[in-house]
Image: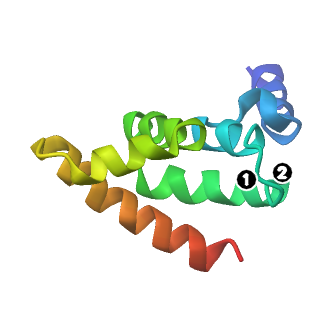
Amino acid sequence: MRKLIVATALALLCSGTAYAGAIERACLSSPRGAANPKLCGCIQAVADRTLSSSDQRMAARFFKDPHMAQEIRQSDNASHEVFWKRYKVFGATAESYCR
């Protein structure tokens, strides 16, 4: 049991992008010049605290298709509206926390 705990701890400490979340992976693969591991990791940490995993997957798609964000924001779909409210909180939090 102890070996499993130690192995898990080492995996978490040495994870890098192999265990990166959806937002972090999308951020790191973004063509924007400001993307770097520290910033993308911070944004992922905020996402982990403010968005569900399905929200994160949808938000990650915005990195490749920014127009999709506009479509979701303007959608009449009630679930998109609720998502967008959570996404705005995420964005504001990441902006202030990850400077």
Tell me: 10 left or right of 41. right
Label 1 CA crowd tier, 10 Å (few <14, some 14–19, many 20+): many
Three-letter code for the amino acid on which mark 2 is drawn: Pro
Which secondary structure, mark 1? helix
What label does residue 70 carry, if any? none
Relative image position of residue 67 (x, y in whole percent): 44, 44
Relative image position of residue 43 (x, y in whole percent): 63, 58
Where, quadrant-wise, is the N terminus in this rendering? top right
Label 2 CA crowd tier, 10 Å (few <14, some 14–19, many 20+): some
Label 2: which residue? Answer: 37
Relative image position of residue 63 (x, y in whole percent): 59, 43
Tell me where residue 95 sits by quadrant. bottom right
| Rendered position, 74 above or below 95 | above
Residue drawn where x is 77% and y is 44% of the image: 31
Relative image position of residue 77 (x, y in whole percent): 12, 41
Where, quadrant-wise, is the C terminus in this rendering? bottom right
Label 1: which residue? Answer: 40
Tell me: 89 left or right of 5. left
Of 69 and 5, the residue lying toward us: 69
Distance between the Cα atoms at labels 2 and 1?
Answer: 5 Å
